[in-house]
Amino acid sequence: MSQATSVPIAGSHPYRAPATRRSRSATSGLRWPVLVLFLPPALLLFTIFVVLPMGEAAWYSFYNWNGYGLPALADWVGFRNYELVFKNSAFRQALSNNFLIILVSVLVQVPLALWLATMVSTRIRGAVTFRLIFFLPYVLADVAAGMIWRFVYDGDFGLVAGIAHFAGVDSIYPLANKSLAIYAILGVVVWKYFGFHMMLFIAGLQAIDKQVLEAAEIDGATPRQKFFHVTLPLLGSTVRLSIFFAVVGSLQLFDMVMPLTGGGPFNATQTMVTFLYSFGVMRMQVGFGSAVGVILFVICVTLAFGYKRIFMKND
């Protein structure tokens, strides 16, 4: 009497499924202790330092409160603070300045960083030195950079005054001119942060397979065609990430504006954060400042999640 023998079918692995189930079970068994050990402290810290302050700011924004003691029921003003914020001409100017900074960051700063990255990413003589020089402004503290450029823009003793004296013309005072001050700050913003974006692009360029570029050269592509049809599409995720950082950073600009102009002259260079500090913290209008903070938070979250959902959903 012969026994029937099972013949394995080619390409089949009859014993893989139990092993896979065992490995998944083992992974799940290891995951829970890690979650139980590390997740509660992280959630606790996030709740204490992020969620609770945000909730308090939203609550205080409904009061006409100066920050002393606790807000009383008589201080309740509802949405009055939000109404006053949007009626304030300085806040509208700050909002306009923030979007102007975003525009310059996206249209000037990011392309400049990409152009310089393509120049110093190749193995040429002195490339590492140029990378360091271009990246140094980003390493410099924002307050220190603001103080340095305040001296540069000084119309009496700074670099601007020296150039005007050398040219034999009257010196100008960019930071004291209501029409020029915001453009002086924009120049500092581009100088300060383009090095960060340049390093992002250098990392992206170094990750591109050189054989792809060599194949484009063999096919007769010009340097311009190679950049726009090969390099730039492969850098798509890096470009989108760089723009995201530029937008979020522009909305939070504060440290460099305060030593340069403090939001002046005549509120011409206010950003939303400097406006919050000047009109909320310095004047002890905590309820009003909390309303500004809530508006800034809503704008940042909306832009961040909207941008990620629309442009970075596949990254």
Image (spheres, rainbow, N blue to C red):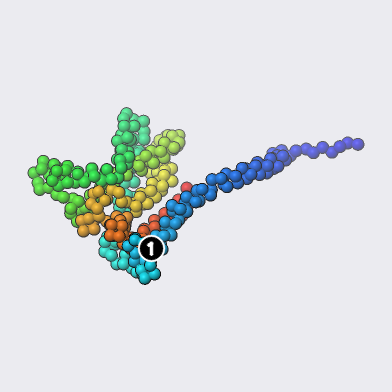
181 left or right, relative to 29: left
The foreground one among 276 and 239 is 276
Residue 295: image x %, image y %? Answer: 37, 61
Q: Which quadrant does the N terminus fall into? A: top right
Q: Residue at x 19, y 44 (%)?
A: 151
Q: Residue furthest right?
A: 1
Which residue position holds label 1?
Answer: 70
Quarter of the figure with residue 193: top left
Foreground residue, 7 or 107? 107
Left of 42 or right of it: where is 77?
left
| Image coordinates for residue 208, horizontal then vertical, percent | 44, 38
- Relative vertical location of residue 211 with respect to residue 154 in this rendering, above or below: above
- Residue 229's x, y, as percent? 40, 43
Q: Secondary structure at mark 1?
A: loop
Residue 49 spot, x, y in % from top left? 43, 52
Give amino acid for label 1.
Leu
